[in-house]
């Protein structure tokens, strides 16, 4: 079974600075999808960014980018120019080819003004 | 991406009673997923609901406790039966988009007293 590990339960960043959230996963599959989701306090969980395992190019969505290292099974999220609205719990998720998704335990990000 | 309306947003229930949570999607989807999330923690998949067939339950979850209805391609309900304080949690429904990322409902915060 796949596992997803987020080793940082909490992170903090100064507004306008850059922060990187870590995620590693374990799988024997070669074809899969990886995601980062954001869950603001008492608000809906939303998809931030996705990465297809067969693509070597790292995904980017505005201030959010990933560092996907397939051989190392690492999938970190970089948030540039952090904003107060980025404060949330961030979940890394793995979707297998068969369609089953596994979520990490989450990282709570605090943004300091 | 799909829009999901989830009701109720929160409820406080007496132990021994049941609560039915509804999710309405604005487009037809094959599978709907039901998750449980303890506040500040990760998501645990309860079951996958396909239209026209029995839901598929994950280990530790049984149909008698969490019956699921999926009468059509846009609607599903999850019932939490014979509730105990241990059932206090956030319940989320989700659907998978074309890019395999999830869209989540806004969640139901359940407190059992």
Image (spheres, coloured by chain):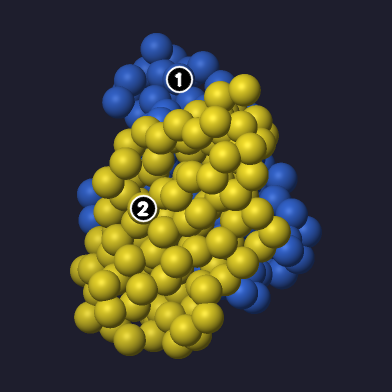
Chain colours: A yellow, B blue
Front in this rendered view, residue A10 or B43: A10
Q: In the figure, is residue A100 to the left or right of A4?
A: right
Q: Is residue B61 visible?
A: no
Callout in the foreground (1, 2)? 2
Q: Secondary structure at mark 2?
A: loop
Label 2: chain letter: A
Locate the N terminus of chain B and report the quarter of the image it occupies: bottom right
Image label count: 2
**Crowd rating for badge 1 (residues with CA inside 10 Å; few <14, some 14–19, many 20+):** some
Give the residue pinned by disc 1. Answer: B111
**Crowd rating for badge 2 (residues with CA inside 10 Å; few <14, some 14–19, many 20+):** some
Locate the C terminus of chain B and report the quarter of the image it occupies: top left
Residue A20, above or below B18:
below
The answer for how far apart the CA atoms under marks 1 and 2 are is: 32 Å
* Residue at the far right in the pictured view: B26
Q: Is residue A66 visible?
A: yes
Give the residue pinned by disc 2. Answer: A22
Residue A42, above or below B66:
above
Q: Position of residue B104 (x, y in %)?
A: 60, 51
Q: Look at the numbered discs 1 and 2 and tell me whether their residues touch, using CB distance below 8 Å.
A: no
Front in this rendered view, residue B12 or A52: A52
Q: Quadrant of residue A72?
A: bottom left
Q: Position of residue A59 (x, y in %)?
A: 57, 71
Front in this rendered view, residue A104 or B105: A104
Q: Quadrant of residue B5?
A: top right
Front in this rendered view, residue A17 or B102: A17
Q: Residue at x 35, y 56 (%)?
A: A23
């Amino acid at each position: 079974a796949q596992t997803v590990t987020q080793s940082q339960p909490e992170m903090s960043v100064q507004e306008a600075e850059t922060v990187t959230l870590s995620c590693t996963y374990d799988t024997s599959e070669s074809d899969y999808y990886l995601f980062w989701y954001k869950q603001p306090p008492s608000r809906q969980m939303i998809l931030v960014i996705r990465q297809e395992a067969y693509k070597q190019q790292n995904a980017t969505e505005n201030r959010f980018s990933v560092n996907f290292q397939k051989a190392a099974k690492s999938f970190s999220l970089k948030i540039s120019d952090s904003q107060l609205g980025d404060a949330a719990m961030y979940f890394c998720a793995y979707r297998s080819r068969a369609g089953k998704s596994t979520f990490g335990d989450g990282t709570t990000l605090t943004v300091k003004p | 991406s799909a829009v999901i309306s989830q009701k109720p947003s929160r409820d406080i229930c007496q132990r021994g009673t049941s609560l039915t949570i509804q999710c309405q999607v604005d487009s037809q989807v094959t599978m709907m997923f039901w998750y449980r999330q303890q506040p500040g923690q990760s998501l645990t998949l309860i079951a996958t609901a396909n239209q026209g067939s029995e839901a598929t339950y994950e280990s530790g979850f049984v149909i008698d406790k969490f019956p699921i209805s999926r009468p059509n391609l846009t609607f599903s309900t999850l019932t939490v039966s014979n509730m105990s304080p241990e059932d206090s949690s956030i319940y989320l429904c989700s659907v998978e988009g074309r890019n395999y990322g999830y869209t989540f409902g806004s969640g139901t915060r359940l407190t059992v007293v």
